[in-house]
Image (cartoon, rainbow, N blue to C red):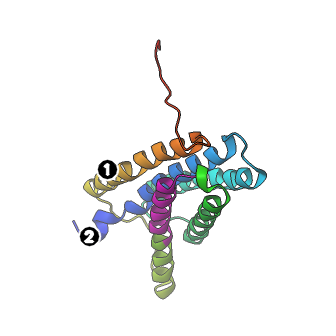
Amino acid sequence: MTAATFVRSWPSVSAWGAGLTTAALGAGAIIRPNSGAVASGLGIGMVILGLASLAWGAATLSTGRLVVPRTALAGALGALALTAALMFAAPAHTSIVGVAAASLLLVVVGASAALHLRRTARDSSAPRTAQPMSVVGLLVAAAVIAVVVTPALGATQNAVLLRDDGTVPVISHEGH
């Protein structure tokens, strides 16, 4: 197993983590009480790009190669821009942990797409076929993404629920 085979699945798994986190940040911006038009608009864009990221990750993993790398790069850059804009539009109700996790994962996706574009531009005669991937590499990537995304999703919920006095309500599930 080579290093390239080991990490070949990482862009698709990173896209899933970025998609989940971006969609959660966007959904929080939409449903938050007293969310303004700017935050809601940014949220809608983030949910759309988050869902697109999930679909791109699935397509990339199922084909064994990076699909539509220019679109993936544009999507990653767009999601980074929307995430930063939401952080400035609603800083008190946007999770910095969620923004950091999404940004890190979007950079992985964008950098992978950019490297792929550069490689294919240099060697345009190379066939676009599926490349071998490592199951161990996929499992390691999934574990890393789970460790990054799970706290980010929890922090995103807390940021949305944050009260004006800086406290987060405790939601009990008694009797359920």
Q: Secondary structure at mark 2?
A: helix
Look at the numbered disc 1 and give the secondary structure of its residue. Answer: helix
Q: Quadrant of residue 5?
A: bottom left
| Residue picked out by circle 2 | 3
32 left or right, relative to 144: right
Residue 91, image x, y percentages: 60, 56
Question: Foreground: 35 or 41?
Answer: 35
At 47% across and 20% down in the image, what residue appears? Answer: 173
User: Badge 1 is on which residue?
Assistant: 143
Q: Position of residue 15 (x, y in %)?
A: 48, 57
103 drawn magenta: yes
Q: In the current view of this chain or complex, which residue is farthest to the left?
A: 1
What is the three-letter code of the residue carrying label 2?
Answer: Ala
In 3D space, how far apart are the residues under numbered discs 2 and 1 (Cα atoms)? 18 Å
Q: Main secondary structure of the magenta part?
A: helix
For this orientation, the residue located farthest to the top is: 175
Magenta segment? 94-110
Instruction: Please give the name of the residue rendered at 59% of the width and 69% of the height, measured from the top-left corner.
Output: 77
CB under 8 Å between discs 2 and 1: no
